Amino acid sequence: MEETKTAQKTRLTFPKGFLLGAAAAAHQVEGNNTKNDWWRAEEEGKLKAKSGLACDHYNRYEEDFQIAKKLGLNALRISIEWSRIEPQEGKWNSKEIEHYRTVLQKMKDLGLTRMVTLFHFTLPVWVADSGGFENQKGVEAFARFAWFVAENLGNEIDLWCTINEPGVYTAMGYRKGLWPPFKKSTVPMISVYLNLIKAHKSAYHAIKEVIPEAQVGIAKNNPYNEPFYRNHWLDRLLTRVVTYIGNHYFLDRIQNECEFIGLNYYFYHQLRFHHKHGGVDMNRNRHEEYRHDHTEFVRSDLGWRLFPEGLYHLLKDLKKYSKPIYITENGLADAKDAHRYNYISEALSATKHAIDEGVDVRGYFYWSLTDNFEWHEGFWPRFGLVEIDYETQKRTVRDSAKIFKEIKIE
Ligand code: FCB
């Protein structure tokens, strides 16, 4: 990663049909999602920021889609907010269904392929109160919701994404305790993770029952892990075990229930078996300032080390599933827009490299189209191709966003 902006153009050509898009999630952009567990926690002061009106995307979606189109994108990934559709158990809100129908039709009118996520971290309060995915009831409720969306909006959805980042959701809500339901407890954490496997499968079957030809997948967050000491057997073993549990356990179990794999890529870890204490040190963005080639890491505003070429290795690694792959998220918080152009350019080169070596990658979705509510961090991290002025809701396209117009699709 070079540190500065570059005047150089990115000249890459992707195969016919390749999707170049951006991703977002309802609670992070829509505003006034008053019926979910995040909103409640925000109101109760359990989070440092309130999502409030967010980007007012609920009302300004048309403007946002038009911007996406102008940037040269041909696809978008959005999420449908469960708590809007089913604010109370079994009570379906037809007004909200119509809202999403209009939203999805607008995308189609603009020639944007529509990928839709059904669970992107937020639960209706009634689901959260009955234990969320800690129990079978949550799994069944989710499958019913998936079925309902398929029945009512199915023909407006091109690609389905059941669950966003099962691992991140469980870690943040049940191990680190930073997100609802703010638990730090191993037993519920494991049961939620295992139940999310069931939830994916049940939702998959529910959707396919209504629409047999539906293209259904998941957005799986896989970090790229390397041993800290490449020749040390303990570090290598550790890397294999951590990668299996984190990157493959879930996918291995759902591989017969998906038409594609969605990959969210943000993190590069150097794993070290901590010899002194006999423990495991993940070195997550903490100690190591240098890469294996001794060049210094560039970091995003959140302190995440930027390592776009990790994408190549992860894509190669997913090849074994013999499924089409979409990069469902990849991006960085960069308020000054100093690194975004180069980062995307290198991430797309890594993608192209994997395609050239036979990996069936069908699309790349940058996170995110606009700045948005970054969960427990609040509004300060700026991930957008488009800057949001939260005082006025004015949208301003960042310079780096020009990259998508430079990419060719055969
Ligand atoms: C991912 C989430 C997404 C966004 C990005 C920065 O883990 O799926 O909602 O917050 O990180």
Image (spheres, rainbow, N blue to C red):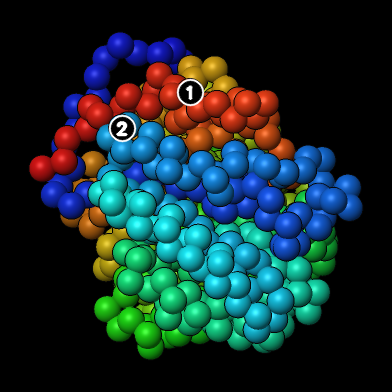
Q: Earlier in the sequence, mark 2 or mark 1?
A: 2
Vertical side of 271 occupied by 72: above or below: above
User: Alpha-carbon neighbours of circle 1 within 10 Å: few (<14), some, or many (≥20)?
Assistant: some
The single residue placed furthest to the right in the displayed view is 44
**Residue 60 x/y as whole percent:** 51, 41
In the image, 396: left or right of 320? Answer: right
Q: Residue at x 56, y 65 (%)?
A: 96
Q: Residue at x 69, y 58 (%)?
A: 171
Vertical side of 139 occupied by 240: above or below: above
Q: Which mark is residue 70?
A: 2
Which quadrant of the view contains residue 374?
top right
Viewer-side residue, 219 vs 349: 219
**Residue 236 x/y as whole percent:** 51, 52
Viewer-side residue, 360 vs 98: 98
**Amino acid at pointer 2:** Lys
**Amino acid at pointer 1:** Thr
Which quadrant is home to the C terminus? top left
Helix, strand or loop status at disc 2: helix
Which quadrant of the view contains residue 322?
bottom left
Q: CA distance from mark 2 to mark 1?
A: 13 Å
Which quadrant is home to the N terminus? top left
In the image, 218: left or right of 408? Answer: right
Q: Residue at x 35, y 58 (%)?
A: 105
Q: How many marks?
A: 2
Can residue 56 be seen in this snapshot? yes
Vertical side of 23 occupied by 291: above or below: above
Helix, strand or loop status at disc 1: strand
In the image, 375: left or right of 345? Answer: right
Residue to which mark 1 is pinned: 396
Can residue 310 be seen in this snapshot? no
Viewer-side residue, 389 vs 353: 389
